[in-house]
Image (cartoon, rainbow, N blue to C red):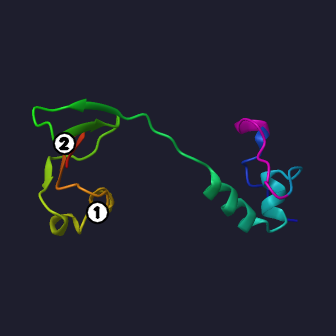
């Protein structure tokens, strides 16, 4: 029998429920080698974030405030080539019409 994981619902909130086997706890998942089902369950969880927006002096730009630190120092990505080292910036440049992305310590400004 496998050792207990320490993650059972008794100590840490409601018990884990495997989407394929709803009666299964996390200890049983580990004991019965249902790790793939656990990975699928984790991938299906959705994360949300409330992001505030603010207009700027430039009518073509919009500031986004995620409520979390974005960068330590300000970074200006003036074109898509400068964004190659930043996955987030590359994703923003995939949006049709984006011409510039600027990261401040707690905001992102996008210009179209």
Q: Residue at x 28, y 45 (%)?
A: 70
Task: Name the residue nearer the viewer: 80 or 84.
Answer: 80
- SS under mark 2: loop
Q: Earlier in the sequence, mark 2 or mark 1?
A: 1
Q: Quadrant of residue 12?
A: top right
User: Residue at 23% across / 47% down in the picture?
Assistant: 71
Q: Is residue 106 visible?
A: no
Badge 1 density bin: few <14, some 14–19, many ≥20, Cα 10 Å: some
How far across and down, in percent of the image, does residue 47 sit? 53, 45
Considering only vertical position in the picture, is 12 above or below 21?
Answer: above
Magenta span of residues: 10-20
**Residue 18 counted in the magenta span:** yes
User: Looking at the image, is 84 positioned above or below residue 96?
Assistant: below
Q: Indicate the position of residue 62 as horizontal and vertical percent values.
A: 22, 38
Pick the front one: 1 or 79: 79
Q: Which residue is mark 2?
A: 104
Name the front one of labels 2 and 1: 1
Image quarter where the N terminus lies is: bottom right
- Magenta span main SS: loop
The answer to whether residue 18 is left or right of residue 107 is: right
The question of residue 27 being in magenta is answered with no
- Residue 67: image location, x then y, percent: 35, 33
User: How far apart are labels 2 and 1 at the CA level?
Assistant: 17 Å
Q: Position of residue 50 (x, y in %)?
A: 43, 34
Residue drawn at 28 percent across, 63 percent down: 90
Q: Nearer the viewer, residue 82 or 73?
A: 82
Can residue 108 be seen here?
A: yes
Q: Nearer the viewer, residue 61 or 33?
A: 61
What label does residue 90 carry, if any? 1
Characterize the local packing of mark 2: few (<14), some (14-19) or many (20 or more) Cα atoms within 10 angstroms. Answer: some
């Amino acid at each position: 029998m496998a050792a207990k994981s320490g993650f059972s619902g008794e100590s840490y909130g409601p018990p884990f429920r495997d989407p394929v086997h709803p009666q299964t706890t996390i200890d049983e998942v580990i004991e019965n080698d249902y790790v793939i089902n656990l990975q699928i369950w984790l991938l299906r969880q959705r994360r949300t974030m409330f992001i505030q927006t603010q207009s700027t002096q430039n009518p073509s730009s919009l500031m986004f405030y995620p409520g979390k630190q974005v960068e330590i120092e300000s970074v200006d990505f003036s074109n898509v080539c400068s964004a190659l080292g930043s996955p987030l910036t590359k994703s923003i440049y995939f949006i049709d019409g984006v011409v510039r992305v600027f990261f401040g310590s707690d905001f992102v400004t996008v210009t179209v």
